[in-house]
Image (cartoon, rainbow, N blue to C red):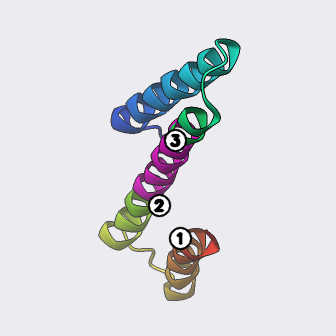
Amino acid sequence: MKCDKSIYNRLKRTEGQLRGVQKMLEEGKECSDVVTQLSAVRSSVDRIMGVIVAENLKQCLENPSANIEEQEEMIQKAIQLVVKK
């Protein structure tokens, strides 16, 4: 899969959030503050996963396979990625 620039940017922001959590731990910040930030990181990762799956599904629908069974399989895989959560 080609990495869209917006996905890459989201990943970089999430990386920054995670580094912030590491710094909080080094500085001995309150547990509740650390957990709040970790929750934000988790939400960010969930959004990235959603964008990737949605883009994959969009590609399947915009560029359908000539083989109907293959097309159905690709769509089912995308759905399973969402449901798997």
At numbered mark 3, what does the secondary structure look like: helix, strand or loop?
helix
Percent across and percent down for residue 34 are 59, 33
**Other-residue count near label 1 (Cα within 10 Å), few / some / many at <14 / 14–19 / ≥20:** some
At numbered mark 1, what does the secondary structure look like: helix, strand or loop?
helix
Question: What span is colored magenta in the figure?
Answer: 37-52
At numbered mark 2, what does the secondary structure look like: helix, strand or loop?
helix
Q: Is residue 47 magenta?
A: yes
Residue name at image x 61 percent, y 68 percent: 85
Which amino acid, mark 3? Thr
Q: Nearer the viewer, mark 1 or mark 3?
A: 3
Earlier-in-chain disc, 3 versus 2: 3
Tell me the tag on residue 82: 1
Residue name at image x 52 percent, y 41 percent: 36
Q: Mark 1 to mark 3: distance in Å? A: 24 Å
Q: Which residue is mark 2?
A: 53
Tell me the tag on residue 61: none
Tell me the tag on residue 36: 3
Percent across and percent down for residue 17 are 50, 27
The reply to whether discs 1 and 2 touch (Cβ–Cβ < 8 Å) is yes
